[in-house]
Image: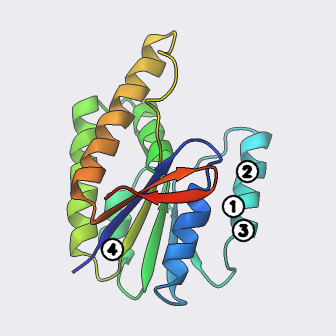
Amino acid sequence: MGELIFIIGGTRSGKSQQAQKLAAAYGQKVGYLATCIPGDEEMAQRVLLHQKNRPSHWETIEAPREVVQVLRQDSAGFEAIVIDCLTLWIFNLMEIHRSEAEILTQVEQLCEVAKEAKAPILLVSDEVGGGIVPDNALARKFRDVTGGANQIVARHAAAVYWMVAGIPVKIK
């Protein structure tokens, strides 16, 4: 059976690097499920940096919205799978007008599929609850949906790491 490992923290806290480090410990055959849709040049540069920072022999699977389906179909044959990240996946689903209930149902499905996978799943997410209250309804909805999703994943995860300034703190 699969194992769900959750890596959460603030922006630039070292989440992706920690997920990569943990995944590499499982073996050479790692799948990297990327959820980002670069919307501008700055984001495209961030994607390039992420690509340069992971081993070139890892297989990248682009899945901005189809995370559950891809995980069901493509998880066999990997020794570990990194999903980077939950936060962008939620944004992408909100962008196509998925409701909070639909998104949280998909997060539950992701957790169930992860537990059935043949390889451990390392899921990266941003902690969105530590800042100020957003000044607009859409940003508040995003924060609320992401906060709920993070709680669901943490509940299902075998291990949870909180990243602080590049240092992993195991909280579960």
Disc on the earlier residue, 4 or 3: 3
Q: Please give left or right for residue 103 compared with residue 79 in the image.
A: left
Q: Can residue 159 be seen in this view?
A: yes
Residue at the extreme top:
135
Question: Tags 1 and 3 in contact by the CB under 8 Å rule?
Answer: yes
Question: Tags 1 and 2 in contact by the CB under 8 Å rule?
Answer: yes
Circle 2 sits in a helix, a strand or a loop, which is it?
Answer: helix
Which of the two discs, 2 and 4, sits closer to the camera? 2
Q: Please give left or right for residue 166 compared with residue 151 in the image.
A: right
Q: For the residue marked with disc 1, what is the amino acid?
A: His
Which of the two discs, 1 and 4, sits closer to the camera? 1
Q: For the residue marked with disc 2, what is the amino acid?
A: Arg
Real-space CA distance between mark 1 and mark 4, rounded to the nearest whole angstrom = 24 Å
Q: Mark 3 points at which residue?
A: 53
Q: Name the residue under label 2.
A: 46
Real-space CA distance between mark 2 and mark 4, rounded to the nearest whole angstrom = 28 Å
